[in-house]
Each structure stands twice: as C-alpha cells, then as structure tokens.
Amino acid sequence: MLTGRSEPITITNNSGTNVYTFTGNGTFIFTFQDASGNTGEATATVTRIDKIKPIVTVSGADVIAVEFKATYNEYGASWTDNVDGSGTNVVISGIVNT
C-alpha cells in the first residue's frame, strides 16, 4: 500500500508500459523501479473474464405474418448468461410496417 508522498516509477517489465490487457483469467506481476534504484512489484489478478456469449431466446413463432393494417403483438424475449444469470428485461424496438 502506498502512503504519503510518491515519486514517478518506471515499469521494468511489460515493455515499460503500465497497461496490460488480460485475454483470459490470470495473474500478471508488474515490476518497477524508482529514481533511486529501489525496486518492487505489484500483482494484478483477474478472475471474471467471460468469453461465452449470452443466449437470447425470442418468444413466439420464428416467422410471423401480419395482415395489412392488423395489430402486431410482441411476445417478448428472454436471455441467459453464464455469469449474469437470466432475465426478461430485453429491449425490443422498431417499426412493423403493415
């Protein structure tokens, strides 16, 4: 934990950049050095990278025929995700030109 005054440091791994892009769950250790030559490290850990797409299920028939000037009834949709669970709060928008 950093307390009090601080000074610039130089990252000595990761090509000198303080940005690291995680492509999967895991740990990365940044090593650094200050102007006086003191060294240290900081560990960054990511555990919730979700690469599985959610599933959206449209309610009702796959194809709906709407007669000219007839009313279109929306039957809604639901979603399921391996991290966020499931729900029915799906925003459906657009115009049905009858």
Image: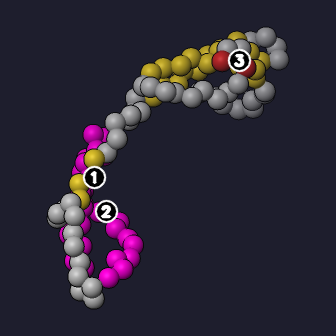
Mark closest to the chain's N terminus, 1 or 2: 1
Quadrant for the N terminus in the image: top right
Residue 24 in percent (x, y) is at 44, 25
1 vs 3, front mark: 1
Give the label on residue 15, or none: 3
Q: Residue at x 53, y 19 (%)?
A: 28
Q: Find the distance from the CA under tag 3 to the CA under tag 2.
A: 43 Å
Residue kind at label 2, given as amino acid type: Val
**SS at mark 1 in the image:** strand
Predominant SS along the magenta part: loop
Outermost residue toward the left?
Answer: 60
Question: Quick one: label 1 or label 3, which is nearer the N terminus?
Answer: 3
Name the residue that disc number 2 marks: 90
| Mark 1 in CB contact with mark 2 (< 8 angstroms) | yes
Instruction: Report if residue 55 lies within the magenta region.
Output: no
The mark closer to the camera, 1 or 2, is 1
Task: Give the image location of residue 67, x and y in percent.
Answer: 23, 82
* The image quarter in which residue 30 lies: top right
Task: Say which residue label 1 marks.
Answer: 56
The magenta stretch is 71-98
